[in-house]
Amino acid sequence: MTDTRELSNDAPILDVRNLVMHYRTEKGDVSAIEDVSFSLKAGESFGLVGESGCGKTSVAMALLQLQAENAGFEGGEILLNGKDLLLMGPSEMRSHRWNDISMVFQGAMNAWNPVHKVGAQIKEAMDLHVKPQLSHSESRERIGQLFEMVGLDPKMMDRYPHEFSGGMRQRAVIAMALSCDPQIIIADEPTTALDVIVQDQILSELKKIQRDLGMSILYISHDIAVIAEVTDRMGVMYAGKMVETGPTIDIFHNPKHPYAFLLLSSTPSITGPRRKLAPLEGEPPNLLDPPDGCRFHPRCPFVTDQCRTEEPPLADIGAGHKVACWNWESVPPLSEGLRK
Amino acid sequence: MDTLQAPEESEIPGDVELRLQHEPLWRIRVRLMQKSFKANWKLFKRNKVGVVGLVIIIMFAILGIAQPILFATGVWDKRVYDVRTGNDNRERIAEMTVVANVDDVVDPNTQIDRRRLIAEGKNAEIGDVIQRELKHPWPPDRNHLLGTDPNGSDILSQLMFGARAAFGLGLLAATVTVFIATTVGSVAAYFGGWVDSFFMRFADLLLMLPILAVLIVASSFGRFKLWHLAIFLGLLGGFGGTAIVLKSQALSVKVKPFIDAARVAGGNNWRIVTSHLIPNVMPLSFLYVMFSVTGAISSEAVLSFLGLLNIDMSWGLMINKTQSAGYLLNPSTWWLIVPAGLAVTLLAGAFYLAGRGMDEIINPRLRNR
Amino acid sequence: MGRYVFKRFIQMVLLFLVFFALSWIALQAIPGNSIEQQLRLNPNLPPEAITQALERRGLDKPPIEQFWIYTKDFFTGDLGVSWSRYPQPVSSLIAERLPRTVMLFSVALLFQYLVGFQAGKYLAWRRNKRGEMAITIAGVSLFTVFYPWFGLMMILLFAVKLGWVPTNGFIVESIWRDAPLSANRMMMTMFTSLMLVTAFIGLTVWASARLDRPSQRRMVKLGAWVAGIGAFFVYWLTNDNLVYAKDIAVHLVLPVSVLTMVGFAGVMLITRTSMLETMKEDFVLTARAKGLTEAMVRDRHAARTALLPVSTSLVLAVATVIDGGIITESIFGWPGMGQLLLASVVAEDIPVALAAFSFTGILALLGHFAADVLYGVLDPRIRVTSQG
Amino acid sequence: MGDVRKIDEILEDMTVRSSSKFPWRFVALLAVLAMIAAACGGTTADTTAAPDVTDTTSGTETPDTTMGTDDTTPPSVDGFEYKIAVIEDFTTDNFWTYLDTDNSVYNGYLLGGQAAAVYTQVAPNFTLAPSMALDAVPPIGAADGDNWVISVPLRETLTWSDGEAIDANDVAFTFNTVKDLGLGGNWLGSIPLATDDDPETADVDESAVGLLSVEAADDFTVVYTFNGAPGLPLWQYGAAQFAVMPEHFWGPIVASSADAETFEASSGEGAPSAGGFTYTTREEGAFARLSAAPYYDTGARTVVYENGAVEYTGPDGTLENYGGTPEGEVVSDDVAGPFASEVVFTVTGGQDQAVLALTEGEVDFWLTPLGVQRGFLDRILAESDLEVITNPNSGFRYLSFNTRKFPMSDTSFRQAMACMIDKEFMANNVLQGVAISLDTTVPPANAFWHNADIEAQCAGLTQEERVGASIQILKDGGWTWTTDPEWNADNLDVIPKGEGLSLNGETIGDLSVLAPGPGYDPLRATYSLFIEDWAQDLGIPLSAEPTGFNVIVEKVFGPTDWDMYILGWGTGVFPDYVVDFFESSQDSAEGGFNTPGFNNAEFDALAAEFKQATDLADAQALIFQMEAIIAEEVPYVVLFTTPVLEAFRNNLDFPFTTGLGGIQQWNGSQVSVKSSQ
């Protein structure tokens, strides 16, 4: 299985196609993921950005098949090396978790079980997935290496999570994610709740590791700046839908979906071009009863009648840049900002 | 210590009062209560465990209320159905033949062997046909739906009286418990320091006591009536374990911003405790009412069962009387022991179940995702 | 840590002193001295016999002096002499009763917590699925069942109707009449052998973690189980006193089963609540993401963390064994500490009652202390804060 | 993957620190192994030691009885095990302790048979008869200066179970031990030690008559010296009957005991017995055993007649007669055993368990002072091999008035209350067979002392007639109502109830009757409620207060601010208690037993005479008169007694099954019970 990455550089190792997932609640179905597609090639990093509640985390959970109990897939497929995860049985799925797809969780504190030592929690995954099973000392050696790789003292593996600082914990989480040598790492808000300097360190650490180990990383963040910093390609999600996807540089500099445009406008950027800040007004829609037509239309400054009735398709506007908007052409360049 | 952790959030946000100042406060409170009641009722209904408990509680409440009504309407004659002095002495006669050998007895109701006759102190010759009074306890029939006890007293009537006793005792004990525990817990949490130490050490002290033994000691104090027991249990619980739980809840409320806000606004300490802290501890307190009722009912039953309470009638006493008269392990007189035992179990269990149902609403950690 | 323990210890001693004094006052305050009453109600006794009997028990002195003498003796290790079983020393009464209580309740608590914890885990794991309500209601019913009644019903069913187990008592006379050792001695041997086997297996398994190769670890662990259980069986099967051990074991079956039935639900509910809270934690998700099986996630992560309040409750349950034993012991005719406590309180035998009270008090204090320590051991987060 | 608990998941830094930590764990492991080994070794030592212990004990125990019972072989024809269930544990195996501080009925069942006595009472009619003594009737003795000396010749043939003679030295030894060690309790009840007058309290004469010394004039003559002439209670029913213990066994123990406490803490295991069984062993909380032992009286035949007369044929065939001329029906014909090789007491957890043991065939007899409860009868009678007998209990439950206080001080008030109480109705209709109506403190079953001529107030009247009679009694006594009570024939009730009852203008305040709660005694609790009802019918504002037993006792034996109470007495056969309960000098306010504060000069005179009486017939006549006064003046309303039901397996052959208190009164007739199989 670990050899598959050698197959081809072109074939995506992860291909999400038209994924539809709903949460069934007493009040009705919540459409959390609506027709989302993206793919990830070996060694590539892809970013998913959007407000909280837009379905990013649902996508991450779907990739690990750890969605909530009331979630149901209405369509689509998640192909991992060509095999559909949605069709796998629980035990087969388990063998892929961490082994092929691991995850750097958000809020690293809670990702650790407080009653076990950090090393033990990493070893636990290795015992399951690394074949042949490593001996005690071999495991420790490997964990030590991983710790060094993420910039931690190997002795820390015998400490409990609460003895780690936030940044150290996050590094340890990365070490854990790397422990079984996965093809894909999902980094879900990897730097949220860390102070800025640590954020930066962690991100460069991740980038370095990705470079060294050649794995694919799926970044998930509400912070478009983070995504811009570390990904090759990105997608913008809004209300469960992918509204814009393409090379990160294209979108970052030239967003064509009004939501992406406003998102970028509302974020000050140090590295990017100077821009006028524009507020993103209103609140995300209630996914129990999403608006007709384009889901963004109630908040959209470029709204037209068509937007209110017809759902725009994710259309290619060139160079792998796709956008789902009827009026993407009327979205101004970022530098001009939004005219009043 | 206890299964129940203090909820992290209170049901009624503290700042609601500020937002709706143009309305009279009581109306806001009533409306809020209505609203939260409706919402909570919906949640509660979803949890079938709680509903089962509630239904059983209501059943017993009806049972308890029914007895005075039956007396007042004359359906039941006090002389027959009163739990203290009532007895049914309408004679029930059975004819029987005195036989020499117990194996010859065909129908135990109409025939009797000689040994039994001797045991009952009558003289008869073998072969005589004599009339024998059927003695209490009588099995259930039309007049006595659950039969009579060895003294000829109606079991159903005792059961009904016992229901009233159980409710009275349970609710009184629970009210005392929760009133004290809420106050103690809030005060200890708010003031901290030596006040806290004092109450918490006192609580530890009460937790050290062998409760049953202490109740036995207490019950030997003269005319220890049911309401004495209720208050005693209330005090034990109120200053003991419940206080500790509610204190930890109050602590979590104490650090909420609105308490600080009230303090900054120059609120007097007692006012903050009574109008901010306690109302926010109340939901959990109310939950503890349920659990305290369970504890009180069981304690009373155990003490009565051991024959240590001087009370007129209760479920525990019914079992105690059955036992002391020797009918306990006799399956053929099941009506003496099964209804009473079941009643204690059901009502105590029902309050507990209802409590668990409420717990799922009040305790945010247990709420469904 | 040392300072913390010292502070706790001082607190415990002070608390115990207050407890001791309060218990004495409460017992002393019972209206009517039943020892004196019993004597006085016997018309055959001349007044001098009554006076003498009171003098011998020190009851002729004023209460304050009695208390002073009693306290002095108590804290110098002399528990005094029973009033109702004069002149039997209190310590010998306790020595006679304690092994029985220890035997019955150690086994019962073990089962209660094993069954309760497993059931609670299962319940939490199956939340909102079929069976949850049925098990909850059944569990709560057993938890809140009127215990004396339930116990008697079980005796009626299993001992009387079905005749599977003895109805009461802890030994059968016909087996023990010429026994070379006392039942207490036997119980202690049984208890010790159980403890030793458990300790052996536990320690070996613990020590095996040091071994490097997984296969070695497995072998040693398996070996420990086989050797431990094997040694237990070999020891008992070749033991001349097996027949006596068996008799005690047979008598344990019903009380232990009933105690387990009424007690497990409490543990189950604690476990469930605690598990439900734990299951919402992110680390459970992490564990799943790591590809652990559901059983591993449940046992190593959710349940291991949920074990905290359960273990605390176990320690505290140990502390209330004597009080809780009152009913059990009287229903099953198991003359242990609970019955001693009951009898002494009813008879106002203050030396015995006070000793039993103190015993429960000390158990409770140690229980609370042990719970704190255990919490620290099980939850590394607490370990640090409690040191500070 | 499975569900393997991985305790090994705790990672240890082996490579770094193993050298320092590694051995430590295995040392711990080794320590455990060593402990296991030690434990095994220890227990092995036990088992090897065990046979020795059993050998020695059985060596001394195996009785060489005249009946040829052999313990080591299965029981011979007569050698059966008499298996008895008891519901309370024995608390001592030392007879001295039993009689002193641990004077429970159960200790009595176990140890009571050990003692010898100079005179004794013969079952079932309590006939006074010689045991160690040679003469049929206790000698009266004669004055010797200030003292009174009684010399009793003893039989020379009696032996303890170990073969030592039972002689006068044992009697003297027992007396001296009680006196010198200062034993108390019931020892002082049967050995009335003389006390000196305390000069400081000149107004009270403490120098009651008592025993000064008991000496052995020779081996078979014992001399009692009193400091005055003793009456029946002190001599015939007192000192002449005290328990005699073997000096050769206890002497050394007494000598080595510093005080009574150490002495009474010593074990009585191996003590020789004078009663056919010796105490063997017990497991506390489980069982106790007695073994048949050589008995001097084995084979003796005792025939008891209806009138109490006893015909005794000794083992050697000599015929003796006690307690009058044998005539009438034979109530008991008894050959002394022991027939059982063992008496095995099984301690069961409670009465339910005792009945189970009985019905399951684990025991032959349930020995209980309380009797079998009626609820058990169904199940006992369902077993065809169980038999049930019923006898009245020796004792009574009563309502007592505080005669020191108005209105209880008024005789007509008490009489009217007594008249209202329909005991027959209570016994037959309400309590239904679990209570036997009683009118006198000496029950009919105590035939010799019972005054059969006494009738209760308003005996035999209907409820209506009782109301009428009570009203009349009150009116005659000068009582008036504002509203007179009236019997309403339609409702079969008193309507209206009396109101405003007063005597010479003095009205009655709220009164209460203290009675044990239904949890303690449902019978008395129920009774108190009915008494409350009846009193209220007459306009007496009485309320029943369920009160703890200890609280009632505390109240009524101390201060005198109570009104009425209901309690019970368990009584012996010799009715000296009648004196204790009602003699004015026995006022409970001063520490006596006269709780009502009854103060009647006529009664006091009779009581004084009774205490001095030495003749049974005189004493009987005095008791009859005293009872009559009690029935008329009603300080007590004697309410009822309870039947003692006893159940046993029908292979048991008891010498008698009828008698006050039943078989349990005689410790289950251990020596004479036979097995018919």
Image: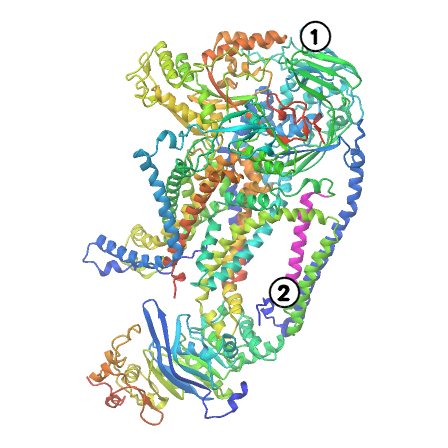
Are the residues tagged 2 and 1 within 8 Å (C-beta)? Answer: no
Q: Which residue is mark 1?
A: D141
Q: Indicate the quadrant where residue D143 lies.
A: top right
Image mark 1: chain: D
Q: What amino acid does circle 2 point to?
A: Trp
Tell me the tag on residue B185: none
Image x and y of residue D534, in percent = 38, 22
Comparing D443 with B366, the one in front is D443
Q: Is residue D562 left or right of residue A267?
A: right
Q: Is residue C191 magenta?
A: yes
Q: Is residue C142 magenta?
A: no
Q: Are marks 2 and 1 on the same chain?
A: no
Mark 1 Cα within 10 Å, few/some/many (few <14, many 20+)? some
Q: Which residue is mark 2?
A: C206
The span shown in magenta is C181-205
Most frequent secondary structure within the magenta stretch: helix
Q: Is residue C216 left or right of residue C61?
A: right
In the rendered image, is residue D31 in sight? no
